[in-house]
Image (cartoon, helix red, strand yellow):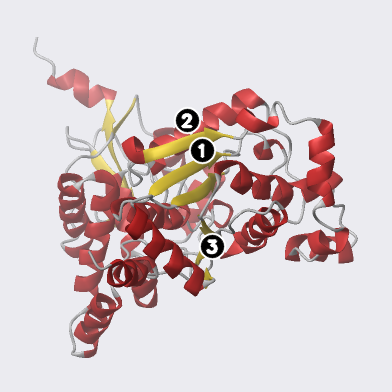
Amino acid sequence: MDAKKEAGRQLVLLERGAEELIPRGELLAKLERSIETGVPLRVKLGIDPTSNAVHLGHMVPYGKLRQFQDLGHQAVLIIGDYTASIGDPTGRNAERPALTMEQVRENAAGYTEQIFRIVDREKAEVRWQSEWYESLPLSETLRLAGAFSLAQLLAHETFRARYEQGVRVGVHELFYPVLQAWDSVVVGADVELGGMDQKFNILAGRDLQRDRGMEIQCAMLMPLLPGLDGRKMSKSFGNDIPILLDPAEQFARLMSISDECMEPYRRLVLLDSPEDCRAAAARVASGENPMRLKLELAERIVGRFGGAARAQRSREEWERRFSRKEAPSEIPVFTCAGSLDMCAILKQSGLTASASEARRLVGEGAVYAGEERITDTGYRIDAAAAESEGVVVRIGRRRFVRVVFASAIEAERPE
C-alpha cells in the first residue's frame, strides 16, 4: 500500500464537516506513519456526564470518531467523572452545581448507551478520569497548575467575559482545561476531537503534552449544529432533537428545520461528501421541491440512530399526518366519566403540561375536536352526542388524543 496516498485519502474523508484542523500537516504525517507502521492513531473524545440528555448536536463529534474507527484508528472515550463535579464552563455565565459521583455514573450510563448507537462499542477504549485522579498527589496537581499562567486561563473567552463583567469565577473552574489537558497526557492522545466551543481546552492539551516532552496531539474541531430555530442546538433553547425521542417525533422535528439548514445536517450529521452536498443543492436549483429532499434527509438521519425500518415507518406516519392530513395510525386514548371543558381534557389527557398552556393554545386556535377548530376555552365535548369511538382532539398536526366516555364504553358491553 502506498502510505502517502492512503494517508491523503483518509485525510480527505476526515476533513468532511470539520471546521478547523490544527495543524493539518501534522495530522497528515501522523496518518502516514500510522499506515506505514500499522499502529492506529489514538483519537480522544471526552464525555461530559453532567446530564444524560443527548441530542443530534452532541452526536456530531461522535460521528467523526466513528469515521476514525472505520479507518482503523483507536477511539478513546474519556468519561469526565471528575471534571463533571466542576462542570465545563464553556459558554456558561454561572457556575454549575456540583454533582455526586452516583449522579455522574448514572448520567454516564445513559449517555454512553446513546453514543454507542454511532460509535463502535467493541472497538472503543473507555476510560474514567477517576483511574488517574483518585491517586494523583497534591504535589502533582500543583505542578499541573503551574504549567499554565493566570493570563493563559483568563484568555478563555467565557472566563474572561465573566471576569470583566464582575461575575464570580471559581478557582476550581480554572482547573477544568488543566484537567482535560492532563487526560491527553495520560492516554497518549494523537488527536482530540471536539466542538468549536472546546478549542481552548483541546489546545491546552497540546501545551501540556509539549511541556511533558511528548508528541503533540492534533485538534479536530467540529462546527455547532443549528437547532430547529437556526441557533445552536441546545436543550435550554428548546430547539433540540433528542436521540431518545420517539422516531416519529424525531422525523417531524427534522421536517421543521429550514431549507437552509439541510446542508449542515447533511454535512455534519450524515458526513456527506462535498460532491453529494452540491448534488443536493443542484436538485433544488433545478426546480425540485425542497420538501422531497427534506423527506430523504429526515429518513436517513432517523435511520442512522433508530434503524431503517423505524425510519421508514416514521416517514409513512409523517406523510399520513402532514401531507395527507390524516390522523396518526395509533392515537392514545383518554377516558373520562362525563362532559369536561376542553382545557381540562387537554391537561388531564397529557396533551398539555398545564391548564394555562391549554388556555393559550385554545385562544390561538391551535386546538381541534375532529375537524372543528375550538376557540372557546369553555367548549365541552358532550358525551351523549359523541359516537362510541369517541372524538379525536388534536393540537396542530403533532399532538393527538382520542377522547372516549365511560358511559359509551358501558353501553357497548354485552348483557
Q: Is mark 3 on a helix, strand or loop?
A: strand
Q: Name the residue under label 3.
A: 218
Say if residue 75 shows up in the picture.
yes
The relative height of residue 260 versus residue 177 in the rendered view (above or below) is: below
Relative placement, left or right, of 147 versus 110 is right
Residue 400 on image: x %, y %: 30, 45
Packing grade of label 1 (10 A; few <14, some 14-19, many >=20) is some
**Secondary structure category for the residue under label 2:** helix
Contact (CB < 8 A) between labels 2 and 3?
Answer: no
- Give neighbour class at mark 3: few <14, some 14-19, many 20+ (Cα, 10 Å): many
Along the line of sight, the residue nearer the viewer: 19 or 410: 19
Real-space Cα separation, disc 3 to disc 1, in angstroms:
28 Å
Asked if one can make out residue 396 in the rendered structure from this viewpoint, the answer is: no
* Left or right position of 209 against 122: right
Read off the residue under disc 2.
Answer: 109
Residue situated furthest top in the rendering: 415
Residue 19 place in picture, x, y as percent: 49, 72
Instruction: First in sequence, mark 3 or 1: give its number.
Output: 1
